Amino acid sequence: PSDRRTAVAHPNIALIKYWGKRDERLAVPNVDSLSMTLDVFPTTTTVRLDPASGTDGVTLDGTPAAGEPRRRVVAFLDLLRELSGRAEPAAVDTRNTVPTGAGLASSASGFAALAVAGAAAYGLDLDPTALSRLARRGSVSAARSIFAAFAVCHAGRGSGAAADLGSHAEPLDVPEFDPALVIALVDTGPKTVSSRAAMRRTVATSPLYGAWAASAGADLADMRAALRRGDLAAVGEIAERNSLGMHATMLAARPAVRYLSPATLAVLDGVLRLRRDGVPAYATMDAGPNVKVLCHPRDAARVGAAVREAAPGCATVTARRGPGARLTAG
Ligand code: DP6
């Protein structure tokens, strides 16, 4: 039946990071960001309207969700009900393909899949821009996973409804640029601090945050030009400096937020050794100790081996540019 829809979405990795919101309720980011959607670790989500049930049902990898994960999904369903003018509760079933406990569980693929499946189940006919705006309300990074390959997410201008309208991702047309991203699974434990809480603390207390946010505009302009040229070395250098700058703002927060572990730093040393040996390889880190290494596809095997040597016990997965979120037949 038409009130049961399934969608699949993939995670994305930001080369220009989003960190910090200017409106928490509407999930409006402080800065523009730019990412690559991956071809690994898809999330598949089914939304079924369930009028007979008195309440929303949320299942994550076969287990009923509770606490914060459940609260975020129910808040998103409330938004779908508000937009569609409908009142039915829903049953949401989400399946991730990230290896269990790999610490990569992605709110980006999760809320992109939920936005696409949920909009269809509630009968909302939204174009990709509107789907991206909607996914942003679940998690800002999810706005970018609506689109394949490279996407820019606009922070929008102003406040309130105007900010909401202007803040969404759009695809970036760079068909020739097709790098590899070697993901180093440095640590498989759960996060010490959620990215949501960490960015709130950073914005509120870090004296470096304003400077990083101000420099992000120049990073984005430089990144766009480097992508247009297909210049892997420039793309990598800009991504690396943008990520390290973001982590510097966190380290200066009070109290400090530190996601980088000794194994992260060992991988970063390995990346520097690769560059010294003439292999273009560049690192970017998000709200956790895992490292994503951007490189030429022909170097991916060598980069993976160097990473595993630098951090013994660390597994690697090589990703390429992947598809946007879409409904499936099922
Ligand atoms: C470091 O999008 O997960 O990965 O909007 O609060 O859900 P919420 O945060 P989230 O933060 C991602 C932060 C990042 C950088 C990025 O992906 O741009």
Image: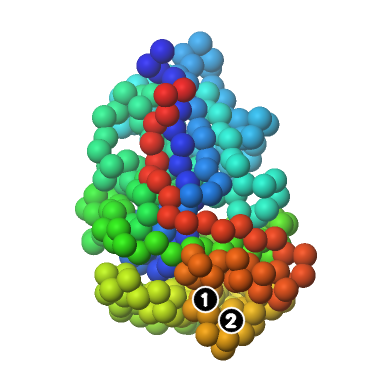
Residue in front for this viewpoint, 316 or 107: 316
| Callouts 2 and 1 close, C-beta under 8 Å | yes
Secondary structure at badge 2 equals helix
Residue in front for this viewpoint, 89 or 310: 310
Identify which residue is drawn at 51% across, 35% down: 44
Q: Is residue 229 left or right of residue 50?
A: left
- Could you tell me which quadrant the N terminus lies in? top left
Marks counted in the figure total 2
Quadrant position of residue 236 = bottom left
* Label 2 within 8 A of ligand 1 by Cβ: no
Q: Mark 2 — residue?
A: 274
Which label was assigned to residue 281?
Answer: 1
Measure the C-alpha gap from mark 2 to mark 1: 7 Å
The first of marks 2 and 1 along the sequence is 2
Residue 274 in the image: state x and y as whole percent. Answer: 59, 81
Looking at the image, residue 264 lies above or below residue 53? below
Residue 306 in the image: state x and y as whole percent. Answer: 66, 74
